[in-house]
Image (tube, rainbow, N blue to C red):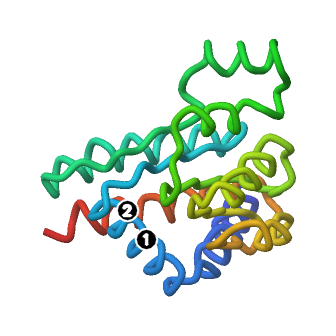
Amino acid sequence: MTDSYLQKYIAEHKKVLDSISLEQVSGLITIFQQALEKDKQIFVFGNGGSAANASHFVTDLGKSASDKIGKRFRCSSLNDNVSWITAIGNDYAYDDIFIRQLQNYARPGDICMALSVSGRSSNVVKALNWAKQNDLFSIALVGAAGKDISERVDFCVVIDSYHYGRVEDAQMGICHMICYAFIEKN
């Protein structure tokens, strides 16, 4: 029984990975190349596993990709300052944990990238709405349940799955493709 479950899991995982639009990933790489050339700040965020992916992505982009190309990506994960997140959540509302950080740091033309399975988390939606109103370029990587968020952002990649783990794995796959386009390009 275990082998058949694992085989099915892997087959479903491959199906999800095969659904990722390489054209869209190529478009994301171009967006990040332009952000690098124009010295724009990149803000990435999400909840739960997507928060971990945001932190991982920013580490790879800010360290490994930047080291390889010799020019620095200016990037931050809005999930990584626990004191600030808890202060905002306590003093205002959990829905404000991303928007209040953007209000401090973001400038027109910067990039705001949300990772979300559902695309419906209030704190993510609120930050993306603020980004749109303040002329940031907004990106979302979401699962099939989050496809409605595409109306709120400038660039949306919908991962064809409702399974949280598979969507989060695919998010990280996309983030790795972006980073390794810079790491392995030279």
x and y percentages locating residue 46 in the rendered image:
67, 43
x and y percentages locating residue 118 in the rendered image:
83, 56
x and y percentages locating residue 38 in the rendered image:
31, 62
Task: Provide the residue designation for mark 1.
Answer: 31
Q: Residue at x 79, y 59 (%)?
A: 163
- Is 154 in front, or is 44? 154
Relative placement, left or right, of 23 versus 20 is: left
- Residue type of the residue flagged with mark 1: Ile
Mark 2: which secondary structure?
helix
- Is 33 in front, or is 178? 33
x and y percentages locating residue 173 in the rendered image:
50, 62
Mark 1: which secondary structure?
helix
Position above or below: 137 against 103: below
Relative placement, left or right, of 116 versus 112 is: right
Q: Residue at x 27, y 42 (%)?
A: 63
Residue contact at pointers 1 and 2, CB within 8 angstroms: yes
- Is 101 in front, or is 155? 101
The image quadrant where one finds the N terminus is: bottom right
The residue furthest bottom is 23
Position above or below: 120 against 145: above
Task: Provide the residue designation for mark 2.
Answer: 35
User: How far apart are the alpha carbons under marks 1 and 2?
Assistant: 6 Å
